[in-house]
Image (cartoon, helix red, strand yellow):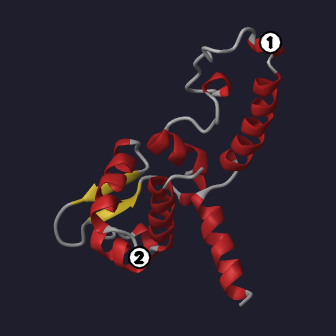
Amino acid sequence: MLTKKTKYAVKALIALARSEDNKPMLIAEIAKNEGLPKRFLEAILLDLKRGQILGSRMGAGGGYFLMKPASEIMVSSIIRILDGPIALLPCVSLNFYQRCEECKDEVTCSIREMMQKVREATVGIMDNTSVADLVRREKEMLGSL
């Protein structure tokens, strides 16, 4: 399940991607425009800054901005920065693998095999969906109303 933390992060990144010329935005502005809680958003944006997705500038004209083009910020990287593994079981995680204690043999575990397929499908979509894709899709949906 997508956590609120990640959902808010994606909404904030979409807002920043919509910003003209990658103009910095204040946390208060993002929170107000996107209907997000300001205090929670502060912590989220700091995590994204540590993850090198966002940069920030102090003073007049300051705020948060994207460190790279929105087309290079993949949903999978946002989730991994904020929530860790995407896989539903630790034994199928690509980056956070842990053996399941109750599993006798991973090679013959049908649950693991099924969850690997789920992970591959999920990660495949998220690895190929950028913030720019989400902005573009949002515009398409708004245009069809």
Separation of marks 1 and 2 at Cα, in angstroms: 47 Å
Which residue is found at the position 75% from the left and 25% from the top? Answer: 112
Sequence-first tag of 1 and 2: 2
Q: Position of residue 114 (x, y in %)?
A: 81, 31
* Residue that numbered label 2 is attached to: 35
- Extreme top residue here? 104
Residue 23 versus residue 42: which sits nearer the camera? 42
Which residue is found at the position 57% from the left and 27% from the top? Answer: 95
- Extreme bottom residue here? 145
Tag 1 secondary structure: helix
Q: Position of residue 27 (x, y in %)?
A: 30, 67
Nearest to viewer (mark 1 / mark 2): 1
Is there any visible trace of residue 26 in the rendered image? no
Q: Position of residue 69 (x, y in %)?
A: 52, 57
- Specify whether 90 is left or right of 58: right
- Extreme front residue here? 102
Tag 2 secondary structure: loop
Residue 131 versus residue 43: which sits nearer the camera? 43
Residue 65's label in the rendered image is none
Where on the picture, by quarter, is residue 133?
bottom right
Numbered circles on residues, count: 2
Q: Is residue 31 above or below residue 83?
A: below
- Specify whether 54 is left or right of 93: left
Is there any visible trace of residue 114 in the rendered image? yes
Residue 107's label in the rendered image is 1
Q: Position of residue 134 (x, y in %)?
A: 63, 65
Q: Amino acid at mark 1?
A: Val
Quarter of the image with the C terminus in it: bottom right
